[in-house]
Image (tube, helix red, strand yellow):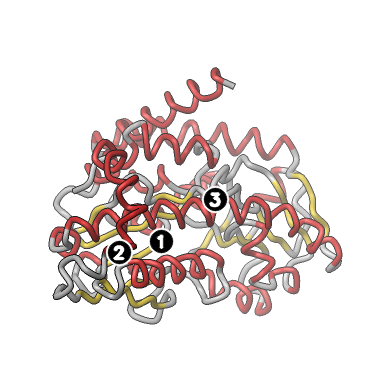
């Protein structure tokens, strides 16, 4: 497995590697299948596909990575299981979709009190985050690596049909809310459900839910959510970042020639960062797009933000005591890094 130290030593070599890749180990021909987790219009799926195609091109077809849209190979949110079972060799998905296996996965995800994008990627790449995630997944046939996390900007707090002006409104809300955030909102009185992103538009039209969280402003504009929810509630309190991670099947990774490993890791780091920067810029533009479409873009009342973060603190204090030690290890590492990061600004 490539550690951060090895990656730093190998990345420079990857710049020249694509120019000679066709002549090195030319007989090696490997085909992988990789899946994103979203519909074709989701920027995360688009960047997943770009990454797969870039790997194929940079290796001159020695490693061909065939991209698949979320839900086309296995049901949505089961991509990581497919990687572990060698149905896929790679996937790009949200850590929180693995809460059924590891409760600590929700910590490295869209959660209340999580690190903001820049800090999250720094923690993952340079402060042991990737190593902790691999430690969490020990015994499972998947792995990740430094550079494989795209933090993304903060998520939309909620797209909603109804006004959300007080804690009373939270208690009467039927909302799609995933991961730890969903559990915390339940504790605050909301009725939360799990619905795949590609089904949210219809769920809102049918009245199954009143509101939902999904992703960034830029991603959500492309999903046409302006058509099914009048209110766009903004706050970094629920999900300061919207991280997604590239995962690999351990055996498939181990079988790659070393020069291809270098190229794959360099391209993964490039495209995850590119997606983050694109969505930061595009989310700024999306605010005016939502407003022009007749939506109200509204800041979440401080009363709700404070209550959410207070409930999150209680939730994670309880989990740190009741879950496996890796939970507290990850939580404490992220919390300390966040405090140190704030002090350095």
Contact, mark 1 vs mark 3 (Cβ under 8 Å): no
Separation of marks 2 and 3 at Cα, in angstroms: 20 Å
Q: CA distance from mark 1 to mark 2?
A: 8 Å
Residue 291 higher or lower than 303, as above or below: below
**Crowding near pointer 1: few (<14 within 10 Å), some, many (20+)?**
many
- Residue lying farthest to the top in this orientation: 343
Q: Position of residue 320 (x, y in %)?
A: 34, 32
Please give the residue where the numbered disc 2 appears in the rendered image.
80
In the rendered image, the residue lying farthest to the bottom is: 72
Quarter of the image for residue 226 reads: bottom right
Q: Nearer the viewer, residue 314 or 28?
A: 28
* Disc 2 to disc 3: CB gap under 8 Å: no
Name the residue located 63 percent from the left edge and 75 percent from the top edge. Answer: 201
- Tell me which residue sits at (38%, 76%) in the image: 67
For marks 1 and 3 on the same chain, the one whose residue lies earlier in the sequence: 1
State which tag comes first along the sequence, 1 or 2: 2
**Mark 1–mark 2 CB contact (< 8 Å):** yes
Indicate left or right for 77 with 300 as reference. Answer: left
Q: How far across and down, in percent of the image, does residue 78 sit?
A: 33, 69
Depth order, front residue of 338/112: 338
Disc 3 crowd, CA 10 A, few/some/many (<14, 14-19, 20+) = many
In the picture, residue 27 is in which quadrant?
bottom left
Label 1 sits on residue: 93
């Amino acid at each position: 497995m490539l550690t951060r130290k090895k990656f730093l030593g190998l990345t420079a070599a990857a710049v020249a590697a694509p120019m000679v890749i066709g002549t090195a180990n030319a007989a090696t021909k490997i085909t992988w299948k990789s899946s994103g987790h979203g519909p074709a219009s989701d920027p995360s799926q688009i960047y997943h596909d770009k990454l797969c195609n870039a790997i194929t091109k940079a290796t001159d077809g020695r490693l061909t990575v065939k991209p698949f849209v979320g839900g086309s190979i296995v049901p949505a949110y089961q991509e990581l299981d497919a990687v572990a079972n060698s149905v896929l060799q790679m996937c790009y998905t949200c850590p929180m979709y693995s809460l059924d296996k590891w409760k600590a996965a929700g910590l490295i995800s869209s959660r209340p009190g999580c690190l903001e994008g820049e800090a999250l990627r720094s923690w993952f790449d340079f402060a042991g985050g990737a190593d902790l995630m691999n430690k969490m997944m020990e015994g499972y046939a998947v792995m990740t690596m430094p550079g494989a996390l795209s933090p993304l900007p903060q998520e939309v707090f909620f797209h909603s049909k109804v006004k959300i002006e007080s804690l009373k409104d939270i208690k009467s809300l039927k909302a799609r809310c995933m991961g730890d955030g969903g559990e915390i909102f339940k504790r605050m009185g909301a009725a939360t459900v799990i619905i795949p992103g590609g089904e949210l538009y219809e769920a809102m039209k049918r009245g199954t839910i009143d509101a939902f969280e999904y992703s960034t402003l830029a991603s959500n504009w492309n999903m046409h959510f302006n058509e099914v929810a009048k209110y766009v509630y903004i706050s970094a309190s629920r999900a300061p970042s919207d991280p997604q991670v590239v995962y690999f099947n351990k055996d498939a990774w181990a079988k790659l020639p070393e020069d291809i490993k270098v190229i794959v890791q360099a391209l993964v780091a490039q495209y995850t960062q590119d997606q983050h920067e694109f969505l930061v810029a595009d989310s700024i533009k999306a605010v005016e797009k939502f407003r022009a479409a007749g939506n109200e873009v509204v800041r979440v009342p401080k009363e709700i933000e404070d209550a959410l973060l207070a409930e999150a603190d209680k939730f994670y204090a309880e989990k740190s005591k009741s879950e496996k030690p890796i939970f507290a290890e990850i939580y404490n590492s992220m919390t300390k890094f966040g405090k140190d990061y704030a002090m350095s600004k």
